[in-house]
Amino acid sequence: MTRVRKAWVSGVLALLMVLVAACGSNNGNNTASPSGSAASSPSSSAAASGTAASGGADQPLYIGLVNPVTTFDVFNLDNAGIYVNSFMSDTLIALNSSYGFDPKLAESIETADNQNFTIKLNKSAKWSDGEPFTADDVEFTLRMFTDASVKTLTNITFVAGLNEAGKRDEGQTELPFFQKVDDYTFIIKTKNPMETDQFKSQFGTYFRYLPEHVLKDVAPADLNKNEFMMNPTVTNGAYKFVKFAKDQYVQLAANELYYEGAPAIKDIYIKMMPATNLAAQLQTGDIQLTSPGVGLIPVQDFDKVANMANVTTGYGDANNPNILFLNTKKFPNPKVRQAIAYAMNRQLLVDQLLKGQGDLVDGMLGRNHPYYNKDIPLYSYDPEKAKQLLKEADWDFGQTIEFLVPTGNKIREQASDIVAENLKAVGLKVQVTKLDFPTTLQRALKHDYDLTVVNLGFILDPGSVFGMFLTGVGFNIPDYSNPEVDKLIAAGAQELDPSKRFEIYKQVQQILHDEVPIIAFYADKQMYAKAKNLDLRKGLETSAVGLTNNVSKWTFTP
């Protein structure tokens, strides 16, 4: 593997790992979250006094969250932490629901050579204590992030001068990839040329920053355990941290110094509760918003919530396929893998389990993804074709196939049970093993499985999506190897023309479709809801992407 590919691949794996970490959290179809009961709820008194339904400038906003918040450490956030921090801490730019980028802390990101990226900060941006947000805060954050003694969930090895772990070598004090131009301008240098949107996605939307003036005296080795990580009193987003009641709620207050203007809603409570409680609390007005990804309404409650007089509902884009991974060492013959694809009655999964709120896709990308290859026909449900392919492949019908299923998402568990029966119907001997997500992932990464199912979440950059199929990389769950795919992915990583890059990844998708190291169950359209008097200014978003970009403009109507 060339030096260029090594650097690129390790950066891709880092990005994928954070998404897989997020996918292990609750996602709306389970009851494993904290209680969120009325007794412990901050909204109970407000609802009793009528504020939850009355509207007006002083009305607090209550949001339902099914994932427990565990930390505010911006280097180690899970799905719930990312969501809550999006209210308190801004990134340089933010991905929006059209898959473009909104300026936030940065006014612009420009490059002349696709390797040195000049970033100009918004001079109006301030910390919530009034101190300006400057390039020194960026440098401080990056210095901490790349220190080997600081625990970080992922890394950024695509920038120049770091080792393969995305850290500085011992004794390396300078940041070779960072150059401060002035207080509001800096340059980031990458190891190799990158397409601009790829850099924006992997760097511009990635970091939330630490206040240097607050944490400058903290030793790197002590940063993760510093009290600031559970009590972030100084932030740069639309809202300030007020209180964290473990397993109950996070309380936020408007940041009156926010550079996009003081938020219209003065107080927000993000309440943690089982997914099964969301519908009841929407109906009573104890919460006024649920969000895709972290506040998913269970499918069995769709009709109930949709018929509530005080609520407006919508369905997010189906952009997060649930992927069935096939261990190519267990199934070396592509005909067997194709047979598994034909054996699955995926339309039944969408119609019965998702009540029609889902898309059928075969690969890693949802239909609305900018890099989705719409020219590839889907595998149909054809059990006779599956039997024929198994016969042609001379499959040994006496061997057992272990199907690892992560617990937590009840709909996915039910879908896996149906798929197992589909496979048995064409003669395959399938044993379903249900394990917690960390154990499932650990076994999958060791290739200690035959079939398993995982949701990787939404990833914009196609290189970060398809990098897992490179021969020999650590995150290659299906243990797939194809020299042609390796060449195409390497070419896609270095191609700077977006249209040419798209054509490369279309070819990758076609090969993966033909060879079937993976096949998607479905991509579900996730229901979310808001109180009718809650104005999000842009209306209900069509996906979780970009939902909080304009949170300072949210308001209640009388």
Image (cartoon, rainbow, N blue to C red):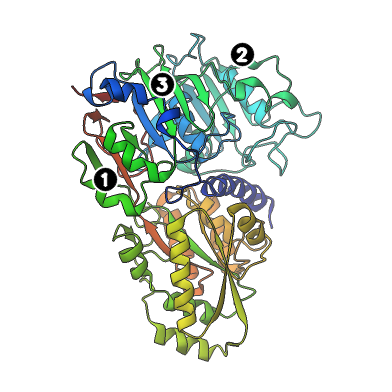
Q: In the rendered image, is residue 364 in sight? A: no
Is 130 located above or below residue 69 in the figure? above
Residue 522 location, x and y as percent?
Answer: 40, 62
Residue at 26% x, 45% y is 305
Left or right: residue 534 versus residue 440 is left
The residues tagged by marks 3 and 1 sit, at their Cα atoms, a distance apart of 29 Å
In depth, the one of 111 and 456 nearer the eye is: 456
Q: Which residue is mark 3?
A: 238
* Residue type of the residue flagged with mark 2: Val
- What residue is shown with label 2? 214
At 38% from the left and 81% from the top, the residue drawn is: 382
Q: Which residue is mark 1?
A: 305
- Sequence-first tag of 3 and 2: 2
Amino acid type assigned to the residue bearing label 1 in the image: Val
Helix, strand or loop status at disc 1: helix
Q: Amino acid at mark 3?
A: Ala
Q: Is residue 458 visible?
A: yes
Query: Which part of the image, by quadrant, shows the N terminus?
Result: bottom right
User: Which of labels 3 and 1 is toward the front?
Assistant: 1
Mark 1 vs mark 2, foreground winner is: 1
Mark 1 or mark 2: whose residue is earlier in sequence: 2
**In front of the other: 405 or 551:** 405
Structural crowding at the residue carrying mark 1, measured as other residues with C-alpha within 10 Å and reported as few (<14), some (14–19) or many (≥20): many
- Residue 95 spot, x, y in % from top left: 41, 38
Query: Which of marks 1 and 3 precedes in the sequence?
Result: 3
